[in-house]
Each structure stands twice: as structure tokens, then as C-alpha cells.
Amino acid sequence: MIDKLLPLVEKPSRYLGSEINSIKKDHGRVKLRFALAFPDLYEIGTSHFGMQILYHILNSQADIAAERVFAPGVDLEALLRNSGQSLFSLESRTPLDQFDVIGFSLLYELNYTNVLTILDLAGIPFLAAERDHHHPLIIAGGPCTSNPEPMADFFDAMVVGDGENVILQMTGEWLQWKNDNAGQKEALLQRWAKIEGVYIPAFYKPQLDKHGLQYLVPRFSTYSGVKRAIVDDLDRMPFPENPVIPFGKPIHDRLRLEVSRGCTRGCRFCQAGMIYRPVRERSPDHLLSLAADSIAATGYEDISLLSLSTGDYGCLAPLIERLMARFGSDNVAVSLPSLRAGSLTPQLMKLIQQVRKTGFTIAPEAGS
């Protein structure tokens, strides 16, 4: 039935799910069906590096099938509503309400309404309190979970901090809970509450103080706070060497290598500089190996060195020199997406234009 709708929409390629390096598993051979939901259009969501990381991590587990879903365009949304069909995943076109867990990436507040649109199109109740163990579990991660309360009522669990280790711990607990035939959702939430970085909104009761400001009262003495999850060594973390290559023209159409996470400056006006602390860097040797594997798996001719401030990476110039020596003959160029004005040097400009002129983005720190 979905195939009859795709010829009627503006960009059918958004919903095909048959891209190079996409992963399709037989649902009958897995125990956990996990939908990775990005509450924005395909072109934007496929450019989100965090989603590629989670897609790689989850699908590397034999018992888990992870599939993607994005907010549909207004044309497909109208067709789904008029036909009474549910929003579906890309890989298997399974209705969203048939998944066991749906994980949302919350990157910016303007996408909050799209979260509700996705749930509505899937026929899933908005509020966590209205969902029982027959509904998918709805979880969230991303920078917006650093201030979770505006969306807390909609989620069963929210991950605060780095998700690489947490997602495997949460899915491991889900598999154990399923094997134990626990049945009730709260039993699983109790398991998840023991994982560092996991916030269970239902385990706190919001109250107002005398000034009208909200504060939270924990329901259990053993779960009185949430500590942010932090990955201590990026070199030991899984990395998507064979990322999905989107159809159409995504926002960022290049190979992305995360060289570091966090920032040394600690500017008080910068949210990202505070919530991604401390600074952790990948080694140049590891990055060179990742680049070789990823280029072979994708055919990209542009490498983007990803970081909050790429110019602060300790081995930037030597890394670019080694990348140029290794891949320059294959016409692979390097671009720098985020540089402070003070970190841009003539040496860097000369290095990145060796193959062809790509570009760099300079981020001014203030208006003065």
C-alpha cells in the first residue's frame, strides 16, 4: 500500500530505505526491534552523525534490528492521514507502533512538535503515563536532554550525555527483562534507572516552590539523581566505517570523521562547550585507519573533520598532511567545518587547498 503513495509525493527517495550500506534484518530472527527516529526531514536527519553511530552500534548486535524513521514531508503526512496508514520505518516499512523501542534524537527545541507528529502518525499515545507494556517504549537522547523537563512527560526514559555505552546497556537490560517475562513496564524502568546517564521521568514527581518554580522530588531514595554519561576514550568507541549513503542531496554530503568531542574554552554563552565536557581526542593513527575504511565503503571524495572547534584539535596540521599524503592522489579533499578565527593559519589554508579548494567555516565567538 505504501508503494501506491510514493509516486504522489515530492521526493519518494526520502522513504525508500534501500540506500548503499543500509542494513535490513529479518524481524523473525531478532529479539528487539529498535526504531531510530529523527524528528525532521530525511535530508537533515541523514546528516546527523550521532544517528549513524547508533545505527552501526545497534545493528552490530545479532539480536537487534535497528531501522530509521524521519518526519515525513507535509505531502506524505497528508496522504498518511487521509488513508489512515501508519508512519513506517525505512528499511522494512514496518508500522512504527510495531517496534519494541523508539529512540528519538533531540538536537534542537524547534523539533519538539515533530516528535508529537511522529507519535500521532504512528497512533501512539503522547504521554508516557498513557502507555503500557503493549506500546513501544519511547526514549530520547541528544543535547536537548540536558534540559529534559519540557519533554519529560512524553518519554519513558531520556539519556543524558554520550550514548554509545548507554544504548547497549539499555538494550541489554531490555533483552534480559524480556527473557524474564516481567511483563510490566515499570520493572524495565527500574532496571534502566540503574544505568548511569538514564533519566526516568516517571520516577520523579514535579512540585512548585513558593516562587512558582518547579523542582523534582524522587519517588525512590535509591534514585535521587542522574549523572551524565561520559565516554572516556573515543578510540575505543564503535565508529560507523560504512555509513549509510543518502539518496538525494543531504545537508552534509561528505565523509565525516569526528576528531574530538568537547571543548577546552568553556565559554559561558555556549551550551555545547559545557554539555560535551571534557575534551577527548581521537588519535591521528586511528583517524587515518577510519578514513581508509570509510572511503573504501562509501566512495566519498570529501572528508570533513568534525568537532566543536576543529582548530583546537592537538594534531590538526599533521593529521591533514597525512590525509593528503594518503588520499590526495585519489582526489580526496579535506574540509574544516568549524574553526575559531584565531586557529586559522596560512599553513592550514595551504594544506586544505592542495587537492582542490573546499572550504572552512569560521565561527566568531562574540560581537565585539
Image (tube, grey):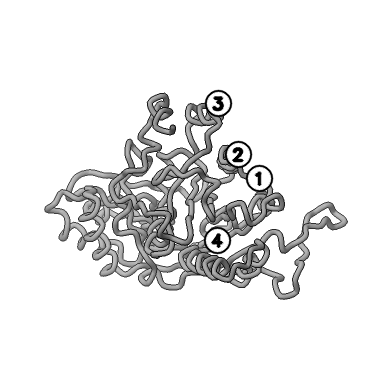
Tell me the distance, in whole angstroms, between the alpha carbons under discs 4 and 3. Answer: 42 Å
Considering depth in this image, is 174 or 202 the residue closer to the camera? Answer: 174
Residue at numbered disc 2: 120
Q: Nearer the viewer, mark 3 or mark 1?
A: 3
Q: Earlier in the sequence, mark 4 or mark 3?
A: 3
Q: Amino acid at mark 4?
A: Ile
Answer yes or no: do the residues labelled 1 and 2 have beta carbons within 8 Å? yes
The answer to whether 113 is drawn above or below residue 29 in the figure is above
Q: Where is residue 292, by image quadrant?
A: bottom left
SS under mark 2: helix
Which comes sooner in the sequence, label 1 or label 4?
1
What crowding class fits label 3: few (fewer than 14 Cα within 10 Å), some (14-19), or many (20 or more)?
few
For the N terminus, the quadrant is top left
Mark 3 falls on what kind of element? helix
Q: Residues within 10 Å of mark 4 (few under 14, many from 20)?
A: some
Question: How far apart are labels 1 and 4 at the CA level?
Answer: 28 Å
Give the residue pinned by disc 4. Answer: 275
Residue position for label 3: 82
Which residue in the protein does label 1 denote? 126
Of the numbered discs 1 and 2, the one sitting upstream in the chain is: 2
Q: Check disc 1 and give the amino acid type.
A: Phe
**Mark 1 falls on what kind of element?**
loop
- Badge 4 marks a residue whose secondary structure is helix
Question: Quick one: label 1, few (<14), some, or many (20+) residues within 10 Å?
Answer: some
